[in-house]
Image: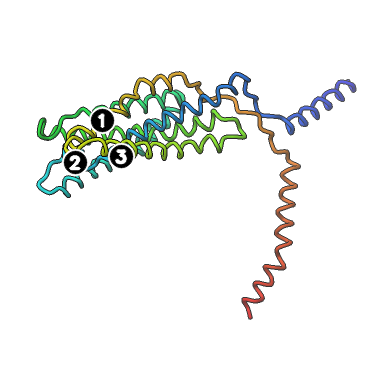
Amino acid sequence: MFGSGIALQIRSRMSRQSTRERLEPVLDPADERLTSRAVLGATIGNILEFYDFGTYSFFAIQIGQAFFPATDAFASLMLSLATFGAGFVTRPIGAIVLGSYSDRAGRRPAMTASFTMMSAAVLLLAITPSYETIGLAAPSLAVFARLLQGFALGGEVGPTTAYLMEAAPADARGLAVSFQPASQQIAATAGALVGEILSLTMTSEALNAYGWRIALLLGAATLPFGLWLRSVLPETLHRPEAHVLVAQPGDQSSADRRIMSLGLSSWPAARSILMLRDI
């Protein structure tokens, strides 16, 4: 009886010791090899979506003339820009809906759904006939396409950011997540370059008539590639974390003592400042 009690105490102490020094679950080697491909795949898909969303702004004048004809060119441009702004109205809605969906179904299904909606919206915008052809249906379809684009893009950022963080090893998560804003700027640069190339190689009449549609169709043409790219991405929801040492209670108390020491050492300087203020 006495011996069994000692054995229980020893096992209890060993358990507490292992708890203090434990590591979080370690990723399988195969998962580690997938990290670079997963981050790259998510980043490329993000670039394509932001290209589709932002290209509209580079051709706002041409789109305004096609869908919002007016006697005043300024009014036509303002209507076109208002339609561009409509995409920002649905972005928070898409962020909440697709963000919560990614927590239930997974990051990959949410990112795939977002990419599909974005590609469908940009394709609809690119092939919609002008106001002269179908009347009020043209601006109505343009507004609907922008609302759908905003919903899709809002639902893209959250799941993609979570995916980048979960796919990366613990010591490179900041770098992986930084690809989210970096990819947005790459997409904006790509859209600007496409606009510049089209404006240099096409006449003003051709650019106004169909040149802007080419820029949008380039984004829509990436639909098969983007869907394939996201379909082969490994899922990261509920994936075990990479190994990270858990802080021990003794380490925390040492840190607290260092912070207190810094506070005490800075007290003479603070007292001098207070004395000077009273002079």
Q: Residues within 10 Å of mark 1 (few under 14, many from 20)?
A: some
Badge 3 element: helix
The Cα–Cα distance between marks 3 and 2, rounded to whole angstroms, is 19 Å
Q: Residues within 10 Å of mark 3 (few under 14, many from 20)?
A: few
Residue at 32% across, 35% down: 194
Residue at 37% across, 25% down: 113
Q: State whether residue 263 is above or below residue 158.
A: below
Residue at 70% across, 53% down: 259
- Residue pointed to by mark 3: 196
Q: Tag 1: residue type?
A: Ile
Give percent across and percent down for residue 40: 49, 28
The mark that comes first in sequence, 3 or 2, is: 2
Q: Is residue 2 left or right of residue 186?
A: right
Badge 1 element: helix
- Residue pointed to by mark 1: 214
The Cα–Cα distance between marks 2 and 1, rounded to whole angstroms, is 16 Å
The Cα–Cα distance between marks 1 and 3, rounded to whole angstroms, is 13 Å
Q: Residues within 10 Å of mark 2 (few under 14, many from 20)?
A: many
Indicate which label's residue lies in the foreground, 3 or 2.
Answer: 3
Q: Is residue 162 left or right of residue 94?
A: right
The mark that comes first in sequence, 1 or 3, is: 3
Badge 2 element: helix
Give percent across and percent down for residue 273: 65, 72
Asked if the residues shown at circle 1 and circle 3 are in contact, with their CB atoms under 8 angstroms apart, the answer is no
Residue 184 falls in which quadrant of the image? top left
Q: State whether residue 33 is above or below residue 278.
A: above
Where the N terminus falls, by quadrant? top right
- Residue pointed to by mark 2: 64
Residue 228 versus residue 14: which sits nearer the camera? Answer: 228
Indicate which label's residue lies in the foreground, 2 or 1.
Answer: 1
Q: Tag 2: residue type?
A: Gly
Where the C terminus falls, by quadrant? bottom right
